[in-house]
Amino acid sequence: MSDTFGLSGDAKAKLLARLSNRAPAQVEHHAPIKPPLGRPEVQADLSMVRRAGEALGIRNPFFRPHEGISGATALIDGKTYDNFVSYNYIGLNGDPRVSQAAKDAIDRYGTSVSASRIVSGERPIHREFEAALAEVYQAEDAIVLVSGHATNVTVIGHLVGRNDLILHDSLSHNSIVQGALASGAQRIAFPHNDMDELERLLGAARGNANRALIVVEGHYSMDGDVPDLARLVAIAKAHGAHLMVDEAHSLGVLGAKGRGIFEHTGVDPADVDIWMGTLSKTLSGCGGYIAGSSELIEYLKSSAPGFVYSVGLAPALAAAGLESLRIMHREPERVAKLQANSRLFLEAAREHGLDTGPSIGAAIVPIMTGSSIVAARAADRLFDRGINVQPIIYPAVPEQAARLRFFLSSLHEPEQLERVAKTVAEALAEVRAERVDLGALASRLAAE
């Protein structure tokens, strides 16, 4: 793997030229050179991070190929690492029963349904899976789509419009923000988990909107904290707003049986209008789902662009998701083990003086560093010690919110978690003791 963080501007230009079948030598001298596609400010930020990494001797931690199934450990370049970058929360990705279900579906239906479901891609496994998902939320029906990100974009973008209002948490996933932007509705981001400010903002804007939609996550993937669902329900009812909850990191993680934030908080799931989730965490596949009223699901199935104009979910993914859900119901001890592991790691990290932010200790535990340089150097140092954890750095998060993010699994062992927490504390102490001349680094980057 390359030790750099990306291509130089020159290399990008040459690559674009090759992709367009116009090698630099073939371009007329007077023809303008196509600038790289993309937002210049984002490219500049990424370039700065790459060059800073090179200057500090930090290897690129991204796109490392895992050579097998990743759970508590991962095989990378022939070496086994303690693994904390995969959301195989209750260890079902790679479970022989799940794999066999996927293989059986391939034997019966093939690797693709070869059409949108509305045309001729409908298969019995789709409806069986959707019925099982609806049952989780005690909902009337559900719909599965081929991408979790696209599910939020197409559903939010399709359900509300220009005369409507969307309020979402300021730390909402990119897919929620993109869906809100696509809708054309008035969009308001309220401070993270601040219910008082949400109610104030909703009250001030509600009168000018036809419909209002509040969108939150049941479990936030960066901080590992949860919203006050009961308060959200009360606010939505008081202002005639609809409530949507993204359960991507909640299913299999929260609640005694892993049913998510409503089980964790004791809230009636019928009080939430739209339940959204993904298939790539607990459900061992790839895709997204929506659960809700039969009227909502029928509307989405007949008109949501990301469903109507997309191929149906691959049979193997539907079968893997369905079998994963069945195992989760039959084996609640997996959820209990995940929750115990998460609490153990959170407590061990805090005992070693590490800042775990607002995490409740449920599968996601950040170790806050307050510096992208510290986070990247610590992750690099830990990789050398056999621990695979990703640094979350600027511009993905504000500089002061840089961190190491740990995903926990039911497959991790207590000894492993205690050892890793101790090693993380040692690595961070070493990195912080090695002062970096930021002025000299900035001057060097500016001169390049």
Image (cartoon, rainbow, N blue to C red):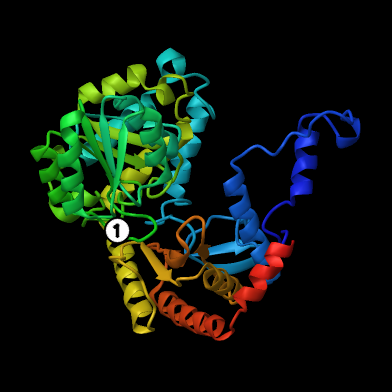
Residue 77 seen in this snapshot: no
Number of numbered markers: 1
Residue at 33% in and 50% down: 170
Q: Position of residue 204 (x, y in %)?
A: 17, 40
Residue at 21% in and 24% down: 294
Inspect the image, locate mark 1, and give the three-letter code of the amino acid beneath it: Val
Q: Quadrant of residue 441?
A: bottom right
Residue at 50% in and 80% down: 428
Q: Quadrant of residue 317?
A: top left
Q: Position of residue 314 (x, y in %)?
A: 48, 30
Q: Nearer the viewer, residue 399 or 407?
A: 399
Left/right of residue 113 with respect to residue 200 in the rendered view: right
Above or below 170: residue 304:
above
Outermost residue, top side: 119
Numbered disc 1: secondary structure? helix
Left/right of residue 157 with respect to residue 237 in the rendered view: right
Residue 164 seen in this snapshot: yes
Residue at 63% in and 62% down: 76
Q: Nearer the viewer, residue 346 or 321?
A: 346
Above or below 172: residue 388:
below
Q: Which residue is mark 1?
A: 335
Q: Position of residue 430 (x, y in %)?
A: 55, 84
Left/right of residue 344 with respect to residue 41 in the rendered view: left
Above or below 286: residue 408:
below
Quadrant housing the N terminus: bottom right
Q: Position of residue 154 (x, y in %)?
A: 39, 29
